[in-house]
Image (tube, rainbow, N blue to C red):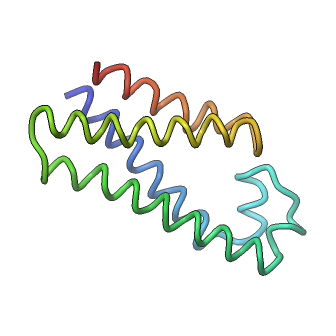
């Protein structure tokens, strides 16, 4: 039960990130992602945010749908693979974007992954 809660938390977080990347104002995105607002107002940045948002949303939806589509060891393996992906991206993001990614993305995914073991 704890594992389901943790994975769903990571999934919902990624859907929330998608919403922020797709629909937030440039000011909200600047604050959330520690970026200059001038940057988040640029067309190229808006397109990049939208693209990233689709990936984050798809990942969150896959984590949720896999709960109903897979069972037993197959579900655990699928969740492990998705959580490893989240952790890898979060490590990179923490080095290249903002360190708070390690707290908000890496830590929940790491805890969920450890519970799968």
Does residue 52 appear to the left or right of 110 in the view shown? Answer: right
**117 or 68, which is in the foreground?**
117
Where is residue 92 shown, x and y percent of the image?
66, 39
Q: Going by the picture, which residue comes out furthest to the left?
A: 71
Q: Is residue 49 above or below residue 84?
A: below
Q: Nearer the viewer, residue 50 or 9?
A: 50
Looking at the image, is 43 positioned above or below residue 20? below
Give the residue drawn at x 86%, y 67%.
Answer: 39
Q: Residue at x 70, y 52 (%)?
A: 32
> Splitting the image into 4 quarters, where does residue 104 fall?
top right
Q: Say which quadrant the C terminus sits in.
A: top left
The N terminus: image quadrant = top left
User: Residue visible at 77% across and 43% down?
Assistant: 96
Q: Is residue 96 left or right of residue 103?
A: right
| Position of residue 80 in the picture relative to residue 4 (left or right) | right
Residue 43 position within the rendered picture, expressed as x and y whole percent measured from the top left:
78, 81
Q: Quadrant of residue 52?
A: bottom right
Please count the marks in the image. 0
Above or below, 117 relative to 62: above
Residue at the outermost bottom position: 43
Residue 63, horizontal then vertical, whole percent: 31, 49
Residue 41 pos. (x, y %)? 82, 75
**Residue 45's image quarter?**
bottom right
């Amino acid at each position: 039960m704890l594992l389901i809660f943790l994975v769903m938390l990571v999934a919902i977080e990624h859907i929330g990130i998608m919403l922020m990347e797709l629909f937030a104002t440039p000011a909200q995105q600047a604050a959330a992602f520690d970026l200059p607002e001038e940057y988040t107002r640029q067309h190229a940045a808006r397109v990049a945010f939208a693209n990233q948002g689709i990936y984050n949303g798809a990942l969150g939806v896959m984590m949720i749908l896999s709960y109903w589509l897979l069972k037993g060891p197959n579900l655990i393996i699928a969740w492990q693979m998705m959580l490893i992906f989240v952790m890898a991206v979060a490590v990179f993001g923490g080095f290249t974007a903002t360190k708070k990614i390690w707290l908000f993305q890496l830590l929940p995914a790491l805890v969920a992954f450890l519970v799968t073991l």
